[in-house]
Amino acid sequence: MGLRILLISWALGLSAGAPASAADRSLSVTIYTDLALVQDRRDIDVKGGRQRIEFPDVSAQIRPETVSLTAGDIRIVEQNFDFDLLTPGKLMEKAVGQVVTIVRVNPATGVETREQAEVLATNGGVVLKIGQRIEVLRDDGLPVRVIFDKVPDNLRAHPTLSVTVIGGHAGTRTATLSYLTPGLGWKADYVALYNEGDSKIDVQGWVTLSNSSGVTYDNAQTLLVAGSPAQVDGAARQPNYYHPPQPRPTLQQAGTESGNRERLGDYYLYPLAERTTIANLQTKQVSFLDVHGVPAEHGYEFRNHWLGSAETPQSAKSIYAFSTSSHAGLGDQLPAGILRFYMRDKRGDPQFIGESRIDHTPMGSTLSLATGDAFDVKVRAVIDKRTRLSGSAWQSDMRYELSNALPTPVTVKLLQDGLWGDARVTAESQKSTRRDANTAEWSVAVPANGKASVTATFESRY
Amino acid sequence: MAAVLTAVHAIAAAPVLSAAPAMAEDAVADKPSALSVTVYRAPERGSGSIDLDDLGGFALISETRTVHLPAGSSRLRFEGVADGIEPASAIVTGLPGGVIEKNRDGKLLSPSALIAAALDKPVTLLRTDQKTGKLTRTAGRIRSDADGGVVFETSAGVEALRCSGLPETFSFEGLADLRATPTLSVLVRSAEPLTRTVTLSYLARDFDWAADYIATVSADGKTMDLGAWVTLANGNAVGFPSARAFVVAGRVNRESGEVEPLDAGGPILAQCWPQGSTSDPQYLQRIGLDERELEMSGRMFKKSVSGAGPAMFQVVALAAQRPVEQEQLGDLKLYRVPDRTTVASRQSKQVRLLDRTGIPVRLVYSADVAADEIAASAPASRLLRTKNDVLHHLGLPLPSGRIAVFASRGAEQLLLQESGMRDLAVDEDVEISLGGSPDVEVAAQKGETTISNARAGEILFELRLRLPAGATIVHADHPLDTKNGRPLFRLTIPANESVTVRYQWRPRTG
């Protein structure tokens, strides 16, 4: 034991820069969707004069260009991020031209012979100069130990950040190191239990943190930010091409209510109540929402593409709609994530019935989420006739056959898209509404264990 | 304070005894006392069979466990959860005051994980003298395990592990919180020591199930018997003894892309410096290098990993068993295996789905012909038609799957055709493809199609026409019908005769 303590202190004395003290360390991390800002406050010993300070326990995915160190009156000369890793091969490579100790072990007697050797080359095999002899290391396959005096200065087990400073007066002071790192992100996960009896859902919201940044953040004060700050792609620093916003079919109506969550600019902030340790490769979940008895609507939707026709009936989508309003809703804005729906089986055990992804959703919105295909509610779209009226004008007679194998009547929202604003409905068996220029919508009641049918005639040009 | 994110009520309810979660005591939940496994099929897979090497489905697993909590904060561990667990989906119910946080640690216990955890910590180096067998223990510490090469330091100096050709290894001081299987832990607080029964539910990957139908057509071809198996498979290294098992039919939405990565670890690779010798030919060295790179890239698994490695699948069929019970689950169909069963690790298991006899069927020959094209003689396709209702001895939801059709030849059964079947709700038409028939040939000219029947009996034949866009049939010498908006002739072809159907169409107007 005594030897071990001696050994450790001796080993520390050998390492090149002074590692910044890990005691009195205070970490705070601000986590965006897939990016984190780490602020690492700790005491450093300043000797006065030029000095290198190492931070070995920063994120392995650190973006070194975002590092900043503030510590009173010291001045930063340079910052280095060393990613030359300590491996046996590198150790031997850096020993070229230097003297190592080799220990030969006689396989017959077990007797050790020590010699000093100069490493000449490591290309393919290790070539040594022992006295005036040139030898290849372990060319005869016999055991030979190679002992190096020390680990070269810039080889480390993990990529390490080092900062060279010129200090003012000697003494201990608090330094704050801050940097951005990918590999630390969060999303929301929701559990929704739908109660078929009274059409209500209970929703629990969990924040899921995941850390693949390579280090553990011990006892960190954690703040989550709902929103994705724009980042410039490191590879192509050219003006971004225009990306049209993605459609959000799940959001039926955007909300206009404000909650009492903390905000920064247009981002919502979710501070964790207690300090927490985010271990490397750990997935951590913290609750942020727990609402019971929110009214929800269950329905069916079927979207037929323009001139879509099917030989066999296709399943309608099973849809659950609810509000995030403070009246008769979840009463909160929802960070982006996955909503998993559960429902109780006949014996009362919750069973999974599907999941849906939602985007950042303001409070007061109406969400309409598909959980999967309905087994018993099907639609078959048929083109009965296509007639050319003149030139580029065509008439399409469409028939939609709906069937319901459930013992209860259902209402299916039947959508025909691809109308592009120039297709007109000239005749139809039941009145449609135009959801938008592109889409006609019928609300079709299908009796229990029964069928229904809708016909429509479109006039279009191409 | 309302904006602070946590299960706030949980903290308010229990006095805060220990502020730092890092000081929490460890408590391990008992082994599950009750288990339930609900298997969902791979959403993208059609009616094909399941691939035991790459199960694309998933399962909802619920475990009932007893926990003993000390007073204050504790870190409650659930050991032995399925290795394909999706940690974000985990739900724990029944804990007093709720859950402060849930964690899944991604590092598994393995030789390389032990080395990584021991980095810069004291370890003991063990060397055995090959001549005398004497064991030497030396205090040291590991300086690096970067890229699989281990560099350590003792009072003698710096050395690389297993580069000398001598037997040498490390002995470690502790497990450093590493576990053999993925472990889910939750941070809870309790005012007093207590014992509770809690339920842990989660979704896990590497499961799948399929329905496999066997239809046997009677000698006269007028009825068939239909039987089906549910085949469910567990590709996880964890088994579920005496579990309530369910399968769910219907397609459910799945959004989760990649599961949070798991470091399944691996051996200590002990990479060395170049070790070529004077007798090595040049090309051999290159091969050696490639192999090393390959080994290194295999160290980090990014998918759900079955830690046990490529074990063989065990296939179990449970014959003479009560069929599964079906019930409605929202818009899905839930099938309950009647008795508790063991869903063992890397096992595929079969239970009876249904058995129906004497289902009336109609054999129909059909062909699909373009009206304005010339087609050489080709076999017509055969279809077995029936309806999924009580009148036809069916009338129950039929989940999609493979169907194998057999015919009797005396006491023997002969396979006629294997095909796929989609999800069929009650009252839907059932069509089972029996493949082509060389006895019934179809040849088309422009404006006419000839069907020849080499069978000894008359057959029902359906001829469907594809017309150019906007065209309509103006004249035909057989009665014309339509199906799905296309012209159709329903014909009866007498035994050993040919029938020619002639038709004229008008191209689109204008």
Image: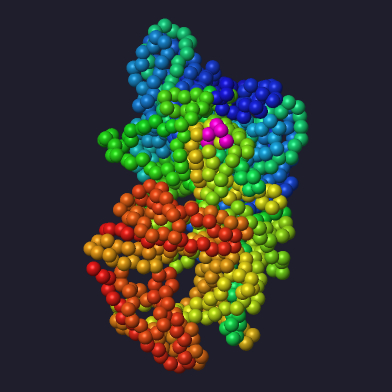
Please name the predominant secondary structure of the magenta segment in the image. loop
Q: Residue at x 37, y 25 (%)?
A: A66
Residue sitting nearer the eye, B114 or A200: A200
Residue sitting nearer the eye, A15 or A38: A38
Q: In the rendering, at what x and y percent does residue A209 appear?
A: 52, 34
Residue sitting nearer the eye, B243 or A243: A243
Q: Quadrant of the C terminus of chain B?
A: bottom left
Q: Residue at x 39, y 32 (%)?
A: A84
Q: Is residue B275 magenta?
A: no
Colour scheme? rainbow
Q: Residue at x 28, y 66 (%)?
A: A388
| Position of residue B114 in the picture relative to residue B479 (left or right) | right
Q: Quadrant of the N terminus of chain B?
A: top right
Q: In the rendering, at what x and y percent does residue A146 appear?
A: 46, 35
| Position of residue B381 in the picture relative to residue B444 (left or right) | right
Q: In the rendering, at what x and y percent does residue B115 appear?
A: 54, 37
Q: Residue at x 40, y 52 (%)?
A: A440
Name of the residue lying farthest toward the top: A169
| Position of residue A363 in the picture relative to residue B311 (left or right) | left
- The answer to whether residue A256 shows anywhere in this view is yes
Compared with A375, B415 (above or below) is below
The region drawn magenta spans A324-328
| Position of residue A60 in the picture relative to residue B248 (left or right) | left
* Figure label count: 0
Location of residue B122 (image quadrant): top right
Q: In the rendering, at what x and y percent does residue B241 appear?
A: 70, 53
- The answer to whether residue A158 shows anywhere in this view is no
Q: Is residue A326 magenta?
A: yes
Compared with B501, A217 (above or below) is above
